[in-house]
Image (cartoon, rainbow, N blue to C red):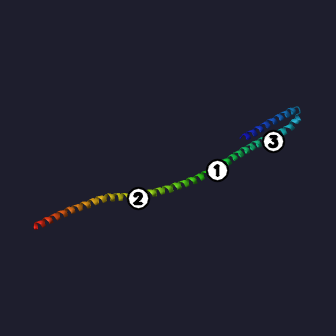
Amino acid sequence: MHEGDTSSNSAEKEKKKRKKRNSFQKESVQSNEICYVNVNVPDSHEEKIDEHQATLDLALAEIDRLANESRHYKQLLQTCGEREHEFKEEIISLRAQLDEERRIENMTNNQLEEKDVQCERLEVEIVSTKSEPDEKDRLYRKLEEKIVSMKNLEERINNSKEMIK
């Protein structure tokens, strides 16, 4: 932007210099009217040249501005391309991490299921182990009852034998 401003400023300065030169020529021409007419033609020609020069300077300044802007956009585009590449690499890395986390989660879930099954088996074993003493106690009581019954029967038999005798 500053280069364009400088170019337009220098074009304006050049234009002022030419106008000053033309005014000196006009003063000298006023003393001689015939020359005045001749000087007038180059003066308008010079004005046209000055106008064209000023237009050209403005166009060159605009071209410089657009070139700078284009360079700036190219740099932005390159920066965006680099960042896009970085983002793609980060996405790939995050996907790999996510896949690894999912594998770990699946393994952990499988281990938990195996532990649940193992816990259920142990619970069944505990219940059966608890019921075994109860069963043994029941059997023992039955045996005791039978022993008592047998003793009673034996006593009766002995009593009966004695009575028979």
Label 2 to label 3, Cα distance in Å? 101 Å
Earlier in the chain: of badge 2 and badge 1, it is: 1
Query: Residue visible at 81% across and 41% down?
Result: 49
Earlier in the chain: of badge 1 and badge 3, it is: 3
Which label belongs to residue 82? 1
Of the 4 image quadrants, the one containing the C terminus is bottom left
| Crowd rating for badge 1 (residues with CA inside 10 Å; few <14, some 14–19, many 20+) | few
Front label number (1 vs 3): 1
Which label belongs to residue 118? 2
**Foreground residue among 98 and 107:** 107
Tell me: 49 left or right of 130.
right
Q: Quadrant of residue 40?
A: top right
Contact, mark 2 vs mark 1 (Cβ under 8 Å):
no
In the structure shown, which secondary structural element does the residue marked by tag 2 occupy? helix
Residue 105: x and y in percent read: 48, 55
Query: Residue visible at 42% across and 57% down?
Result: 115
The residue where tag 3 is placed is 49
Query: Residue visible at 48% across and 57% down?
Result: 107
Tell me: 70 left or right of 118.
right
Which label belongs to residue 1? none
Check disc 3 and give the amino acid type.
Ile
Front label number (2 vs 1): 2
In the structure shown, which secondary structural element does the residue marked by tag 1 occupy? helix
Of the 4 image quadrants, the one containing the N terminus is top right
Residue 68: x and y in percent read: 71, 45
Label 2 to label 1, Cα distance in Å? 54 Å
In the structure shown, which secondary structural element does the residue marked by tag 3 occupy? helix
